[in-house]
Image (cartoon, helix red, strand yellow):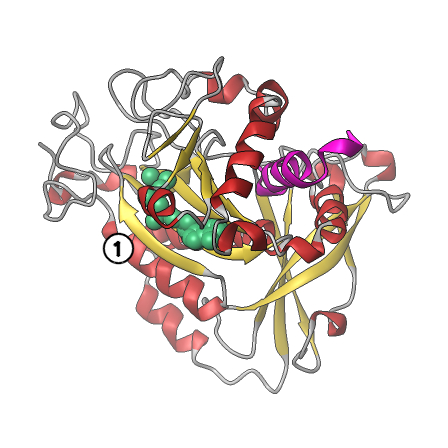
Amino acid sequence: MASLAQVSMASLSVSSGLNKAVRQQYMSLPQGGKCQVTYIWIDGTGEGLRNKTRTLDIEPTSIEDIPEWNFDGSSTYQSEGSNSDMYLIPVCMFRDPFTLDPNKLVFCEVLKYNRLPAETNHRAACNKVMEQVKEHCIWFGMEQEFTLLGMDGHPFAWPQNGYPGPQGPYYCGVGADNAYGRDIVECHYKACLYAGVKICGTNAEVMPSQWEFQVGPCEGIDMGDHLWVARFLLHRVCEDFGVVATLDPKPMKGNWNGAGCHTNVSTKQMREEEGLQYIEQAIEKLSKKHTEHIREYDPRGGEDNKRRLTGLHETSNIEDFSAGVANRGASIRIPRQVGQEKKGYFEDRRPAANCDPYSVTRAITNTCLLDEEE
Ligand code: ADP
Ligand code: MN
Ligand code: MN
Ligand code: MN
């Protein structure tokens, strides 16, 4: 079995080996009353995140204080070189856990030259749906699973030739032989809390070097906003440590668990006494839209999830819809406690780790609350 001491330096990035003590000297310099604002957006792959930074003269106090900006879409798979300017529209603001107060991280929607949403801007459509169902106070909580890789693309701290011992001891495990890369998970958790991202927990997963963090409960559009920023923070923390986080839903073939993004859902009615009947109604509606949902649950219309939703490794088969209390092999699970209390929330276990949370939450909201309009 691999120990961290066996991780070869070649599998860590070069920049992670730069002198961090020297960096700290510059980081603690006063910045003359100015504010650094880092704009973050989703690129043309629908999975990649990009960012760039500018100086503002005064610290913004709300998102309205952050000016629109632009970038070269021909370098992000988002437009042709001849007409390449894309607009960045700030939508939510967080504290910057890397350069610290008063600096900000600002998540942005991307608009094309004609000010229509870019192809991979699924927030615009999601927001429209969330506005229509405001009175339902729909809450989401998403469980983001991810896998740490070395710079060589091999799972972090796995033996160079061969495999770690079979799955069993790793889920929620402790000890150098069970937990690979906890530093990243702990630093990411702190970074989220500092930033103001609504992270609510974390745990080691079934496959070694695979981890999960949970974000929520978040109402409506906030779910996508907070999960995307949490993902940015994850990639940024990993950069400091010289490793890579992948959201591939099945990074290792064979007898290794895949990575999902379980999505927990409740409306005001479901959370109140006898709310279970509304959960059952929602599940009934979801059962009639299985294929439509699978199309929205990864960036390739179901192709990525096909590798993960096999019916094995705590998943349902991609072809079938199923639901059950405490059933982790079903498409939809009603947590045991919710079954007992007859109120609460349900869990859609189908979304892949690399899903767009705006597409997932829009599809669920549309099916469960606005079905008649389709
Ligand atoms: P699991 O047992 O499936 O691993 P986790 O503890 O990892 O569950 O995640 C539970 C998720 O459910 C969290 O993201 C949390 O925010 C979310 N959640 C809890 N209560 C609600 C609710 N009433 N509505 C929606 N989501 C909720
Ligand atoms: Mn979980
Ligand atoms: Mn999990
Ligand atoms: Mn879950």
Picture quarter with the N terminus:
top left
Q: Is residue 373 magenta?
A: yes
Q: Is 95 positioned to the left or the right of 205 in the image? A: right
Q: Is 255 positioned to the left or the right of 225 in the image? A: left
Could you tell me which residue is drawn at 50 percent across and 68 percent down?
A: 196
Q: Which residues are magenta?
A: 356-374
Picture quarter with the C terminus:
top right
| Viewer-closest of 29 and 146 | 146
Could you tell me which residue is drawn at 27 percent across and 15 percent down?
A: 254
Can see residue 230? no
Picture quarter with ligand 4? top left
Could you tell me which residue is drawn at 75 percent across and 34 percent down?
A: 119
Rendered location of residue 29, percent (x, y): 47, 82
Q: Is 16 positioned to the left or the right of 72 in the image? A: left
Q: Considering only vertical position in the picture, is 119 above or below 124?
A: above
Rendered location of residue 223, percent (x, y): 56, 52
Amino acid type shown at disc 1 = Asp
What secondary structure characterizes most of the magenta part?
A: helix
| Viewer-closest of 129 and 341 | 341
Can see residue 241? yes
Q: Residues within 10 Å of mark 1 (few under 14, many from 20)?
A: few
In the picture as drawn, the residue positioned furthest to the right comes out as 114
Q: Which residue is mark 1?
A: 183
| Viewer-closest of 44 and 165 | 165
Rendered location of residue 36, percent (x, y): 61, 72
Q: Considering only vertical position in the picture, is 42 above or below 217?
A: above
